[in-house]
Amino acid sequence: MPRDLALNSLGFPKPPSETRVVVAMSGGVDSSVVAAMLAEEGYDVVGVTLQLYDHGAALAKKGACCAGRDIHDARRVAETMGFPHYVLDYENTFREAVIEEFADAYLSGATPVPCIRCNERVKFKDLLATAKDLDADCMATGHYIQRKVGDHGAELHQAADPARDQSYFLFSTTPEQLSYLRFPLGHLASKAETRALAAKYGLPVADKPDSQDICFVPNGDYAAVIEKLRPGAADPGEIVDLDGTILGEHRGVIHYTIGQRKGLGIGGLGEPLYVVKLDPATRRVIVGPKAALSTRIIPVRGINWLGDAPFDSRPEWHLKVKVRSTRPPREAIIRPTGPTTAEVELLAPEDGVSAGQACVFYAPEGSRIFGGGWIWKGQAS
């Protein structure tokens, strides 16, 4: 009988050379290092890059992922390290699954997070299915997050480097997907380590800047993109206070977000005023004092639960939650109202909670992520 083989670095009981791994390559330094690292370890690496939107427009766009130049960069990395690389045309899928919803969410007064939807509906769904079609044992990405194996299977954990942690954008990864995915960079202490590895492997992207914008939103101008997708979306309307008193006119609801203070054009009214609600139906932007932004109770739906016991198996969970990607997790009580819905009570109220954002669940202590859901009604209470 053959002796038992030790697990390789990706967790399989066979040599790297017999382990096929599809690497999702955006053309940036992170995914390039993952591909190079695994190729050097002797894995059977296949690089795949998704073309997500118009190639011609992408070539002129800097500072975003998945653009035409990035496809070229991913191909060069594959050539440097000697593994096959494929480009898949996902423009229609991306438009339907991500861009259209992004526009509709903004028009409804929500503040969407398209990067989460892209991971959920394109990269970890369609691309993952493609990896399986290629007979890959797993799919690896350059995300800064950790996958650990616990008593009940694969668990999702925050990255070792808090400054790079991408857990907020990956909460909707399902247990089934998590069993197939690998995140080789999650344990690194800093981005400097990643760049040092890129230089070590002689990669042409070693000094490439990080992407900053949402890939299909040039220069962060959401309104221009939405106006192009939904003509007439920027129709002007009234700015009113909480009592309905008209204070001025705005240039389109899509130009405003919950919590915004600057650029309202209604100065000289005494205390500072903030956007507290958007009403696209009446084309009204409602403003009020900072206290009106405070939210303690948040309705959440579309929950992806990553705990060991069923989500609705107990009346409440005492966890931490993050309601915006840039904010630290805060203590909360999560009360299930169904298998995928809940009422989240923040122990200390938060300002600027907005429909369309994610509410991500974290362990009270340690690095584990318990999933999360979508905030569906902004100023609940």
Image (cartoon, helix red, strand yellow):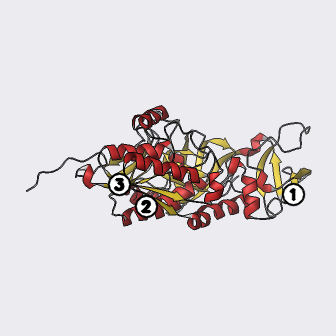
Q: Nearer the viewer, residue 125 or 339?
A: 125
> What amino acid is at disc 3?
Val
> What amino acid is at disc 1?
Pro
For label 3, the crowd category at 10 Å Cα-Cα, with few meaning under 14, some 14 to 19 and many 20 or more, is many
As drawn, the label of residue 259 is none
* Whole-percent x, y for residue 230 in the image: 75, 64
**Mark 2 or 1: the one toward you:** 2
For label 1, the crowd category at 10 Å Cα-Cα, with few meaning under 14, some 14 to 19 and many 20 or more, is some
Q: Does residue 249 appear left or right of residue 94 in this picture?
A: right
Q: Does residue 178 appear left or right of residue 59 in this picture?
A: left
As drawn, the label of residue 128 is 2
Q: Tell me which numbered mark, 3 or 2, is placed earlier along the sequence.
A: 3
Residue bearing mark 3: 21
Residue bearing mark 1: 236
The answer to the question of whether label 2 and label 1 lie on touching residues, with beta carbons closer than 8 A, is no
Q: Tell me which numbered mark, 3 or 1, is placed earlier along the sequence.
A: 3
* Whole-percent x, y for residue 31 in the image: 46, 46
Q: Nearer the viewer, residue 3 or 82?
A: 82
* Whole-percent x, y for residue 135 in the image: 33, 63
Residue 171 seen anywhere in this rendered image of the structure: yes
> What amino acid is at disc 2?
Leu
* Whole-percent x, y for residue 159 in the image: 45, 40
The relative height of residue 236 versus residue 197 in the rendered view (above or below) is: below
**Residue at point 41%, 58% (across, down):** 177
The answer to the question of whether label 3 and label 2 lie on touching residues, with beta carbons closer than 8 A, is no
Q: Quadrant of residue 36?
A: top left
**Residue at point 27%, 49% (across, down):** 16
For label 2, the crowd category at 10 Å Cα-Cα, with few meaning under 14, some 14 to 19 and many 20 or more, is many
**Mark 3 or 2: the one toward you:** 3
